[in-house]
Each structure stands twice: as structure tokens, then as C-alpha cells.
Amino acid sequence: MQETIYLTVTRYKVEKMTKSLPELKRGEWPIKLTLTVADEAFWSPTIEREVVITDWREGLEFSDVEFSENLITEDEAALIRQRRLEKMRELLEAKGYTVNPPEDKSDGA
């Protein structure tokens, strides 16, 4: 048996469970959960599993810039963007991914 459900959670509790992606209110987050139960598991005693949801951004922090003003120049924005792209490439490669540069779309079309 395999079933996909969506849990709507807040910081404090599970608000609801639905079979399709729910409409969310402020402060709610959806969690897609795919549950697979082998036929052999339908016996006593009761089955127990723990599901822990962690921050998907773990290890991908970008504390490379501190803003002291409300405005930045285009040059500063380009520098920040470049630093973040380089940091993301380093982090992904450290986790075993291969990072390829984007395809050049300046073929005149």
C-alpha cells in the first residue's frame, strides 16, 4: 500500500491532513508525505515510525553580506550574486553534485 498525503503544519501543531496540496493560510506550511507499507507489515503489534522534518537549507547558509544601508548599487548586487553562486557551487560539489555552467543562449536567436 502506498499513499501520498499532505500535512498542513504551523509552528505549534498539525492543522489538517489532505490528499491533495492544500490551500494555506499565513503561518502554515505543507509537508508532502509518501507512506509505503509493505503487505507483510499488516500484523500485530502496532507499527511505529518517527518522521523528523529538518531545515532543507542546512549547510546552505549565505551569511556573506551584512546590509548597513537600505540601498545597494548594481555593482554591489552583481558582486553579491557572484559570491552566492560560487558558494552554492562549492557547497553542491562538496555534497557530490556536478555543477555545469548554464548553456550559452546568445546564438543570435
Image: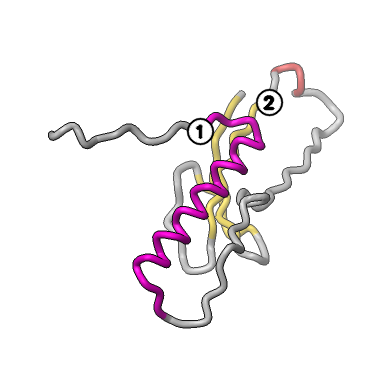
Label ID, residue 37: 2
In whole angstroms, how far apart are the C-alphas of marks 2 and 1?
36 Å
Answer whether residue 104 is magenta in the image: no
State the residue at coordinates (55%, 55%).
8
Element assignment for label 2 = loop
Q: Where in the figure is residue 66, as x and y percent of width and height?
A: 57, 73
Answer with left or right where residue 105 lies relative to residue 97.
Answer: left
| Magenta range | 71-99
Which image quarter: residue 51? Answer: top right
Foreground mark, 2 or 1, reads 1
Q: Amino acid at mark 2?
A: Val
Out of 85 and 55, give the one closest to the viewer.
85
Disc 2 packing (10 Å; few <14; some 14–19; many ≥20): few
Which image quarter: residue 77? Answer: bottom left
Q: Which residue is mark 1?
A: 99
Q: Is residue 96 shown above or below 16?
A: above
State the residue at coordinates (29%, 34%).
104
Which of the marked residues, 2 or 1, is nearer the chain's N terminus? 2
Q: Where in the figure is residue 90, as x and y percent of width and height?
A: 60, 42
Disc 1 packing (10 Å; few <14; some 14–19; many ≥20): few
Q: Where in the figure is residue 29, as x and y percent of width and height?
A: 54, 57
